[in-house]
């Protein structure tokens, strides 16, 4: 099916769980407004991807963003692989708050996800005191440990940038 204006860019919120409570984020207002806490399941994502494909859309850029920290999804790596099976040429862009240990279960999901990620943005706002003030529940020390641990990982072909608001 030939689509006149195919969708080429899409944002997916695979989870709305977050380990922070940033001063500049409206996440809690949305959650308190009635949005249920959830992780998208594979069946729901498959249905969306099949509809996009059947509709003649060819995603070129897929961004994993929203109100949650993507790596808190327990199957984030599986979801990335699924996306890639439908749109193998797409760029996969992920933003993360870097507030987890790469030697934990969450860190394992992170490492398993790297082969599927084209571009990753580390969200780092401020320095020490202002960072911890604005990114409530964060730790500057945890960020530095994350960056040190990340520096020795195989990044595959993943480009890394810093988001600084």
Image: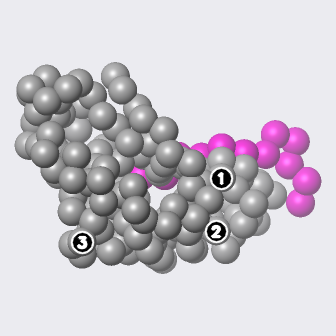
Few, some or many residues within 10 Å of mark 2 (<14, 14–19, 20+):
some
Left or right of residue 1, residue 127 in this image? left
Of badges 3 and 1, the one in the foreground is 3
Quadrant assignment for the C terminus:
top left
Residue at which label 3 appears: 103
Magenta segment, which residues? 1-13
Q: CA distance from mark 1 to mark 2?
A: 9 Å
In the image, 80 versus 47, the foreground residue is 80
Residue at which label 1 appears: 91
Tell me the element at label 2: helix
Tell me the element at label 1: strand
Q: Earlier in the sequence, mark 3 or mark 1?
A: 1
Q: CA distance from mark 3 to mark 1?
A: 27 Å
Residue 152 position within the rendered picture, expressed as x and y whole percent measured from the top left? 40, 62
Q: How is the image coloured?
A: one colour
Of badges 2 and 3, the one in the foreground is 3
Few, some or many residues within 10 Å of mark 1 (<14, 14–19, 20+):
some
Residue 64 position within the rendered picture, expressed as x and y whole percent measured from the top left? 47, 51
Tag 1–tag 2 contact (CB < 8 Å): no
Residue at which label 2 appears: 84
Q: Residue at x 21, y 72 (%)?
A: 104
């Amino acid at each position: 099916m030939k689509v006149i204006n195919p969708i080429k860019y899409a944002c997916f919120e695979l989870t709305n769980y977050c380990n922070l409570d940033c001063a500049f984020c409206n996440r809690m207002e949305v959650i308190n407004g009635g949005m249920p806490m959830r992780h998208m399941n594979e069946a729901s994502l498959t249905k969306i991807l099949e509809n996009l494909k059947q509709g003649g859309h060819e995603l070129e850029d897929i961004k994993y963003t929203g109100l949650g920290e993507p790596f808190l999804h327990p199957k984030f790596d599986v979801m990335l692989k699924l996306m890639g099976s439908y749109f193998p040429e797409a760029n996969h862009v992920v933003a993360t708050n870097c507030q987890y240990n790469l030697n934990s279960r969450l860190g394992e999901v992170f490492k398993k996800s790297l082969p599927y990620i084209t571009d990753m943005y580390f969200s780092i706002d401020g320095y020490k005191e202002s960072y911890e003030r604005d990114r409530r529940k964060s730790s500057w020390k945890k960020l530095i440990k994350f960056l040190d641990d990340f520096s020795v990982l195989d990044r595959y072909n993943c480009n890394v940038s810093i988001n600084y608001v």
